[in-house]
Image (tube, grey):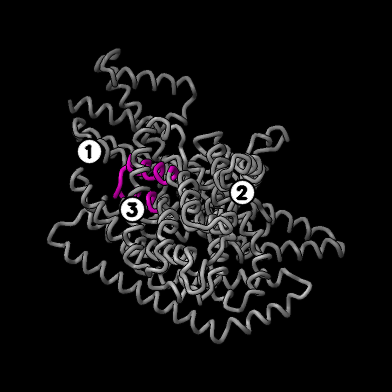
Amino acid sequence: MKATGFISLWTLVSLPCGPLANPAEREDVVKHAIKLHRGKGAVITQRRQWVLESCRKLSGLLRQKNVVLNKLKNAIRAVEKDAGLSDEEKLFQVHTFEIFQKELNESENSVFQAIHGLQRALQGDYKDVVNMKESSRQRLEALREAAIKEEMEYVELLAAEKHQVEALKNMQHQNKSLSMLDEILEDVRKAADRLEEEIEEHAFDDNKSVRGVNFEAVLRVEEDEANSKRNASKREVEDDLGLSMLIDSQNNQYILTKPRDSTIPRADHHFIKDIVTIGMLSLPCGWLCTTIGLPTMFGYIMCGVLLGPSGLNRIKSIVQVETLGEFGVFFTLFLVGLEFSPERLRKVWKISLQGPCYMTVLMIAFGLLWGHLLQIRPTQSVFISTCLSLSSTPLVSRFLAGSVRGDKEGDIDYSSVLLGMLVMQDVQLGLFIAVMPTLIQAGVSTYSSIFKEILRILILIGQILFSLAAVFLLCLVIKTYLIGPYYRKLHTESKGNKEILILGITAFTFLMLTITELLDVSMELGCFLAGALISSQGHMVTEEIMCCIEPIRDFLAIIFFASIGLHVFPTFVIYELTVLLFLTLSVVIMKFVLAVLVLSLILPKTSQYIKWIVSAGLAQVSEFSFVLGSRARRAGIISREVYLLILSVTTLSLLLAPALWRAAIMKCVPRPERRSST
């Protein structure tokens, strides 16, 4: 056994020497190594002779390497003593010699690393999968480190080559007289070199030693195959690497976010094509839904389904499309706030605060009850219940677009109550995202630490309440002292130039969004409050701003609803249609009944009739359950199957929402107001 291990060991040692031999010798070595590994085709004397020859070759290579290293050291000393070279040229030549020294040392180290790797493998137990996995991980780490070192060496050689070319140009320029234009271009070249050195960020070198950074193997896919048709050389392709796609071993796809050379403008053509395709296909899809009497947003969702992974798979930049779609949510909530004046907010603030809290508590209680009966973990039950308790603000905002705001003087209109409760749910969303890390820890904690987790959750709730108080205090200051002069200044400067007004309103919205984000409150709340503050300046101001912002909102909302369609999987829905319909109807009916029960307790007697409309608006599931579900799946709170069920139930509930809304409107709203409400 020891003899076989010894022979196999030196077999591996001799393999790195193979590239130095001719092809015939390499083939003989490989065939002989296979025979030795299989234990046949060679007698003991031949094996010993082959091992001795391999050892002799390896020792000869090591001696030759030492001779070359000594010559390099002498060459470095000679360069340092050469008085005819400038300090910069000396540094360059010494650096070139050091690169070659490093190459020789790394090659020798790789040989002995292979020996140690084989020794570790021979000592391992191959019946133990964990041991084999650990050995594989160590080999993978060694290969990654070797690849990084080789990449760094290649970059250094490219820099040396560039320096050599520049030195040759300088010698040519010194040997001939330059014209005035050549001198100007030479100065520009030097200034450009300095600019590249100043703006270049050494992100790779700066981050490779940061804690938590891992080396990964990736595939680089060129943007398209048109390079071959253009007869582009390999160098030209490498210089144009800005928009190549990288794919890692987990099948995640990456695109360039910041190029090394920031002086060259670049565009993500994949993203441009995705937006253009969504824009073109949204028109017929929205047109079709209008023809059959459905809201146009379902046409946009259908567009996302057709273009997404479950359809034609034409969308490449899914994350970028979803990010742009988030701005549709921001502007939608801004316009909702613009129609939702502070006076109306004051009128329904108690209902808006109490209603969502009671509904969430009841949903969690029912979730824990069903979870106990079905033997589901409490953390999973709490998460699913909280996800399903949220309702879609953009969807209901579309339902309320242009609706009548009240029936009688002094009555509470259903739109005020509904929007107030939805905004409070957005605040709860921010709270739940903040509590999610604690929920993850609670899933793996023992009962002895449950009290600590409960205390931590209470502290987080206190922080959120403090942040909300700070936000509303800031809004009071802005409304009293700042928003009036700010809008008058914008209105004065934007006469004949609407872009100043649009930019000023957008900047104010983003400022409120940033403030609420810094205070760990929902960004959507900041957009809503920005609209509500501007609406305090009067009806004329509201109309003027709405005419400017609505087209922007409409386009971005199309992108948002299309991004929802990217996560709808019709094949999964078809396979599990019976189960999904049962679950969706159960969730919708439960939310409707709970909302009616809660509103019956908190609404005044004169406004009890609006509870049916408000409950119908709250009976669907928010699209933000996609975000929460994806985070919970990555964190291990829910499984893949539960995640797909949440996505499907959310989608089906959004599809059922228009029918339920129309039924409530037909029942509760008088006929003259019904047309504008639907």
Q: Which residue is mark 2?
A: 242
Residue at image point 28% right, 27% down: 8
Q: Position of residue 614 (x, y in %)?
A: 43, 59
Residue at image point 22% right, 34% down: 129
Query: Can you see residue 9?
Result: yes
Q: Position of residue 606 (x, y in %)?
A: 41, 69
Q: Position of residue 373 (x, y in %)?
A: 18, 45
Find out whether the residues at labels 2 and 1 contact each other: C-beta distance under 8 Å: no
Q: Position of residue 333 (x, y in %)?
A: 53, 63
Q: Which residue is mark 1?
A: 130
Q: Nearer the viewer, mark 3 or mark 1?
A: 3
Q: Determine if the magenta segment contains residue 649.
A: yes
What residue type is disc 3 on?
Answer: Val
Query: Can you see residue 238?
Result: no
Q: CA distance from mark 2 to mark 1?
A: 40 Å
Q: Nearer the viewer, residue 480 or 344?
A: 344
Q: CA distance from mark 3 to mark 1?
A: 52 Å
Q: Nearer the viewer, residue 179 or 618?
A: 618
| Residue at disc 3, secondary structure | helix
Of the residues under marks 2 and 1, which one precedes in the sequence?
Answer: 1
Q: CA distance from mark 3 to mark 2?
A: 55 Å
Q: Determine if the magenta segment contains residue 355.
A: no
The image quadrant of residue 187 is bottom right
Q: Nearer the viewer, residue 609 or 490?
A: 609
| Residue at disc 2, secondary structure | helix
Which residue extends farthest top?
A: 41
Q: Which residue is mark 3?
A: 593
Which residue extends farthest bottom?
A: 481
- Figure check: 21 above or below 292: above
Q: Residues within 10 Å of mark 2 (few under 14, many from 20)?
A: many
Q: Which residues are magenta?
A: 628-652
